Each structure stands twice: as C-alpha cells, then as structure tokens.
Image (tube, rainbow, N blue to C red):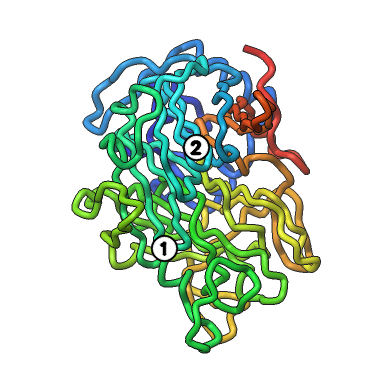
Amino acid sequence: MPRQNRGRTTALFTSVVLVSTVLAGAGAAQAQIRTQPLTGTQTETHAKAQDRTQARTVDAAGRATRQLPALPKTVDGGTWPSGHLQGTAVDRRKGYMYFSFTDLLVKTDLRGKPVGSVTGFTGHLGDLDFNEQDGRVYGSLEYKAAKSFYIAVFDGDRVNRMNMDAESAGVVSTVHLKEVAKDYTADMNGDGVFDGDTANTPDHRYGCSGIDGVSFGPALDRQGGSKLTVAYGVYANTGREDNDNQVLLQYDVRQWKKYEKPLSEDAPHTSGPASPDGKYFAYTGNTTYGVQNLEYDAHTGNWLMAAYKGKKTRFPNYSLFVLDGSKRATWGTVRGQAKPERGRILSLLPRGLHDTASGVYGWESAGQYGLVSLDDGRYYVASIGTVEVDGVTRQTGRAVLNRWTGLTPNPFAPVTRS
C-alpha cells in the first residue's frame, strides 16, 4: 500500500478529502487550498480525534485491516555507543519505531522498549523510511572509500533480537545506486584524478557527496505510483556555484528484488538499476551535506527537506525547505552549472521565510536527525543528545510528536495535550 494512502481512514476529514482531490488532478484553486496549513488548534483537535477513533487502515484491495495503535507524544530511541541519530521511521500498523544511529539500526515499540537491533555497519547508515507497500524499512547506506552507495532494505519483522549482524543475520539486503556513484566520482576539471571524499575540489558533479534523505511518495513528474525518492548529500564548498541545488532521484522499487544482494562490506557489489526513473533539482542554495531527512506529507501533498545550514553568505541558509506538491516538475535550466544544462526542476512552496535576493523560501527548524509525517498535520521530529557512561560518550535520540503550524521561523510545535 503506497504510504500516501495511510490517511484514508473511516474518520475522513475535509482536509484529507482535499488532499486526495488534488493528488487526483484537481484544479489550481483546490491546489491553493491544500497548501494552507491548519491552525494549531485545528491540527491538534484533528490529531486527537484520529487517536480517539483508532481509525482502521485499508489495504490495497480495499479491505479493512487492524486498528492503528494510539501514538505517544515521545518515543525514546535509547542510548548507544554509536554515531548520532540520522533518521527515524515508524510502522504504525504493527506499532514499531526504527532509529538509525549511523552504524546501528534500533527497533523499539512505541513505548521506547528496544526489541531488536542490527549492528556491524562500517559505512554511514542515514535517513530511513517505512514502505507500507512491502512492510520493509529502507535506508541510505554509503561507503565513500569504496565509491559505493546503496539503499539498505531491512526486513523489520525479522529484526527481533538485539545485536543482529548486518552481514550474517539475513535481515539486510542492498541495492546499488549507479547514478550516485557516477556523479560522486565525476572528474569535473578533467585532470584524470579522483579527489576522494573532500569538499575542496571542483570534482563531484553537483557537489555530490553521496546520499542521505529517503522517502516514499508519488512520482514527481506525475507518471506512475509511489516511488522511493533519494536525496543527494552535497558538499558545503563555498567556492563553486554548481552545488546550489538539492538533487533528488526517484525509483520504482517494485522490481528491486532482482537487484537485492546481501551486504558484503569487504566485497561491495554493484547490483542495481542502471539509472533512476527520474532526476530532479530544487534550487535552495548550498547546504552542508544536502538533505539530511526527506519526508513526503500526504496531508498536504508537499515534500519536506531538512538540512544542515549552508555557509554561503549570499543565501539565507534555511534549515528546512518544502517542495510544492501542487506543482509538477517542469523542464528548465539547472542553475549554476559551468556548462548549460537542462533538467526537471521542482518548485519550493511559497510560504514561510522568503529571501528576495535569491528567491528561496524556507524555515528554521529541527528535523535533520529524524522526521516522520503522520499524514494528518502531525510529525515526529527527532532530537539528539549525548551522555557519558563509564567514560564513554553515548548517543541519545528520541522522536517527539509535533504539529505543523506553518509559522515562522519554526513551523513545528510540540503536541502538549494527549
């Protein structure tokens, strides 16, 4: 079941009906309505009603399935001797939350009790998303030294004990992304030398440093159903202009079984699609390592891109950008490229803060460490921290329930009432 169908409950509200209408191809007037956020009171009342009714989900055949569990205001991801929290995902039907701690995947119930973990990653495990169509968790996984970039696919049902090995436990498969590797290794100055994992070089097409943000959502060109969208990491190199775009790739994962291979860190494989189904560009100004968390919101039809702030003084350097889901991608000039280039261009939602000089819209908010849309105006927004245990620094992370207000500078507000 595509993730944008999560909101189709028996307790339908007018705002959700509007979203469905727009996604079906409604006119410009309806598209304008759907980008207007609910007020804080409306959103929280809506959210409380959702939990009170325990709305049923509907499968692909239209059959009612089990009720969704109520959602807590906070889910604690635990304390771990790992890297910091990179992303979160939730399986609402079964009541589990997944946390990526850079080299560790942790699965908890909605009370924050750990029920399983996958360890042993030597690469960078980034953002996560849950695919309601196949019931698995997808995450970005990169090995820059090996020039290998993967989507890691976790069989969440089999993650049922702690410290499962990523290579030998049989719960992780990987798909190689050739397009990312090609852009990462691109010799842009023609000197015949790959400069490696460094920002201080003209190499790496579009400033590509790998991948991070991932999310399931509709095709950005309106062709086809739900697709996996993967966002590039982008180096914060202030001496070039061709890295001022966020770059998004889309893939139809329904045929990915033929590509999936077990993780082998000593012998990285290259099994994966020859090219993406679509490649898209959003002009935001340079950020520090691109989109950290990418999330599609079926409530509005928009896409949220949470990033570490950029360093170029000619841009506003916002930390959250929103793609306008009411506007399809259009062919246009990819800005900032040394050689003229055309590509599929995405539009930022004209809301929030606005920098007139660059034309960029955005907000200042959290979300870089984990962002999950509940498709009803609420989000889980992650927070991080550290603690010292026996002289060892451990990372903490938790998902905190917020509502979207659309206010500036921070559009999120914690849900305070149960």
Q: Secondary structure at mark 1?
A: helix
Residue under the image location 58 percent in, 63 percent down = 234
Residue extending farthest left: 258
Q: Is residue 233 visible?
A: yes
Residue 14: percent from left, percent from top = 51, 29
Q: Is residue 361 above or below residue 127?
A: below
Q: Is residue 355 left or right of residue 149?
A: right
The kind of residue on which mark 2 rests is Ser
Q: How many residues crowd around disc 1 within 10 Å: few (fewer than 14), some, or many (20 or more)?
A: some
Q: Is residue 256 above or below residue 187?
A: above
Q: Secondary structure at mark 2?
A: strand
Residue under the image location 59 percent in, 66 percent down = 245
Disc 2 versus disc 1: nearer the observer: 1
The kind of residue on which mark 1 rests is Ala
Query: Closer to the N terminus: mark 2 or mark 1?
Result: 2
Residue 129: percent from left, percent from top = 43, 40
Residue 80: percent from left, percent from top = 56, 29
Q: Nearer the viewer, residue 297 or 214?
A: 214
Q: Is residue 375 visible?
A: no
Q: Which mark is residue 354?
A: none
Q: Is residue 275 left or right of residue 52?
A: left
Residue 228: percent from left, percent from top = 38, 50
Q: Which residue is mark 1?
A: 146
Q: Which mark is residue 100?
A: 2
Residue under the image location 66 percent in, 76 percent down = 241
Q: How many residues crowd around disc 2 within 10 Å: few (fewer than 14), some, or many (20 or more)?
A: many
Residue under the image location 77 percent in, 59 percent down = 316
